[in-house]
């Protein structure tokens, strides 16, 4: 089984490399950007792709949508620091067959790869419960963001760094960071990457 890992954090890459080296029937192919992933997809035609949400040149979810639209596409698993059910639902809507948090065990990632490669799906029991409760809960209204906060959000979504946003908006980097903290709190997000996914889901940007 050929597995394409699309991930840009060296520690995570190293851990996955060791994990899959121990699996005799698995071959791990690595890419750190969406551009590199496209080349590896054409060259190696993997069976499964394991994709981070936040990549240097864009969103891993966009890559999954792109791959899912093709015939004979590899099965996709999202591998993310975020375990928010809204992010998981967005990933599934994009075409992912599995969702694994980086806080999960190595066995969980292996289980997801094996399940998905066999034509199944994989979500943790905890995430399944969260998704069930989310469906049962009344649809929440998008939290109010100011026009200024939306400007910051749009630039983040385009891949701008905080220092670049500060220069564009004539602000200090500390002020931009504070705006991001306020928006993360409004969206109940733990990271900027998670905040962008939730904002996209709620159509806030």
Image: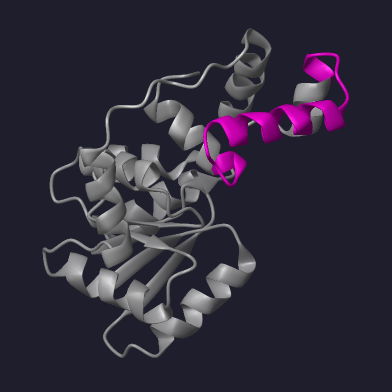
Region of the chain picked out in magenta, as a range: 167-193
Q: Please, which colouring scheme is shown?
A: one colour
Q: Does residue 118 lie above or below 185 as drawn?
A: below
Whether residue 166 appears in magenta in the rendering, the answer is no
Question: Measured from the top left, where is residue 174 in percent x and y?
Answer: 85, 32
Decide if residue 124 is in sight here. no
Left or right relative to 61: residue 115: left
Question: Measured from the top left, where is residue 173 in percent x and y?
Answer: 84, 30
Question: Measured from the top left, where is residue 1 in percent x and y?
Answer: 24, 75
Decide if residue 11 is in sight here. yes
Q: How many discs appear?
A: 0
Q: Residue at x 68, y 12 (%)?
A: 148
Left or right relative to 203: residue 91: left
Q: Residue at x 39, y 73 (%)?
A: 28
Q: Nearer the viewer, residue 141 or 57?
A: 141
Q: Nearer the viewer, residue 199 or 128?
A: 128
Left or right relative to 115: residue 58: right
Classify residue 124 by image quadrant: bottom left
Q: Does residue 99 lie above or below 152 as drawn?
A: below
Classify residue 60 by image quadrant: top left
Looking at this view, name the residue that lies furthest to the right. Answer: 172
Q: Nearer the viewer, residue 127 or 116?
A: 127
Q: Residue at x 57, y 76 (%)?
A: 14
Question: Measured from the top left, where is residue 66 in percent x and y?
Answer: 30, 37
Left or right relative to 87: residue 156: right
Q: Nearer the viewer, residue 124 or 32?
A: 124
Magenta stretch prevailing secondary structure: helix
Q: Does residue 123 lie above or below 143 as drawn?
A: below
Looking at this view, name the residue that lies furthest to the top. Answer: 147
Q: Residue at x 60, y 45 (%)?
A: 191
């Amino acid at each position: 089984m050929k597995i394409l890992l699309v991930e840009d954090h060296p520690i995570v890459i190293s851990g996955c490399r060791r994990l899959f080296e121990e699996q005799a029937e698995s071959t791990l192919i690595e890419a750190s950007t969406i551009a590199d992933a496209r080349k590896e997809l054409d060259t190696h035609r993997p069976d499964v792709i394991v994709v981070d949400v936040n990549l240097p040149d864009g969103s891993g979810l966009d890559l999954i949508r792109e791959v899912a639209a093709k015939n004979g596409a590899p099965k996709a698993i999202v591998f993310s620091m975020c375990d928010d059910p809204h992010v998981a639902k967005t990933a599934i809507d994009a075409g992912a067959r599995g969702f694994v948090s980086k806080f999960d065990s190595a066995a969980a990632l292996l289980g997801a790869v094996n399940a998905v490669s066999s034509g199944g799906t994989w979500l943790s029991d905890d995430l399944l419960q969260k998704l069930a409760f989310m469906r049962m809960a009344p649809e929440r209204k998008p939290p109010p963001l100011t026009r200024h906060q939306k400007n910051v959000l749009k630039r983040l979504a385009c891949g701008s760094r905080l220092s670049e946003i500060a220069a564009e908006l004539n602000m200090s980097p500390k002020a931009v960071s504070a705006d991001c903290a306020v928006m993360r709190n409004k969206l109940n997000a733990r990271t900027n990457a998670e905040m962008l996914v939730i904002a996209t889901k709620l159509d806030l940007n």
